[in-house]
Image (cartoon, rainbow, N blue to C red):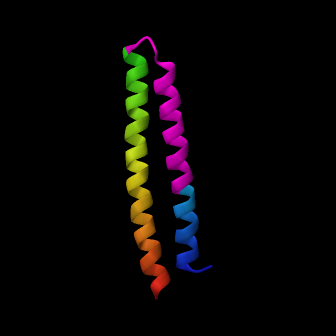
Amino acid sequence: MTLANVLFVLVLVSAFATLGTLFAGLISMSRNQDGSIDGSRRSNRLMWWRVRLQLLTIVLILLWYLASRS
């Protein structure tokens, strides 16, 4: 298995993790109808994780592109 293949699998895993975190955050926000602080903190934490996972996914895509060119 080449480095490009490993990076491609990691891109897929991180992309699906980002998508899962996005949906978990959206569901958490929609369930927090009363505006409680705990619900808002949970939603905010999930959205921060989404941003971090998106950054990881973008970095992995760039690495995969560079590895597949050579």
Check residue 35 for magenta coloring: yes
Asked if residue 58 lies left or right of residue 14, the reply is left
Where is residue 13, by image quadrant?
bottom right
Name which residue lies at 52% across and 55% down: 15
Q: Percent x, y for residue 38?
A: 41, 18
- Which residue is drawn at the image coordinates 44% and 35% (left, top)? 46
- Say which of 12 and 30 sits in front: 30
Tell whether position 52 is magenta.
no
Q: In which quarter of the image is the N terminus?
A: bottom right
Q: Which of 62 and 31 is in front in this view?
A: 31
Magenta span dominant secondary structure: helix
Residue 54 placement (x, y as % from top left): 42, 52
The residue at 56%/51% (across/down) is: 16
Q: Is residue 31 above or below residue 22?
A: above
Please state the total of marks drawn on the protein image.
0
> What percent of the width, then of the height, locates residue 29?
46, 26
Which residue is most to the right? 1
Magenta part of the chain: 14-36
Would residue 9 be found to the left or right of residue 50 on screen?
right
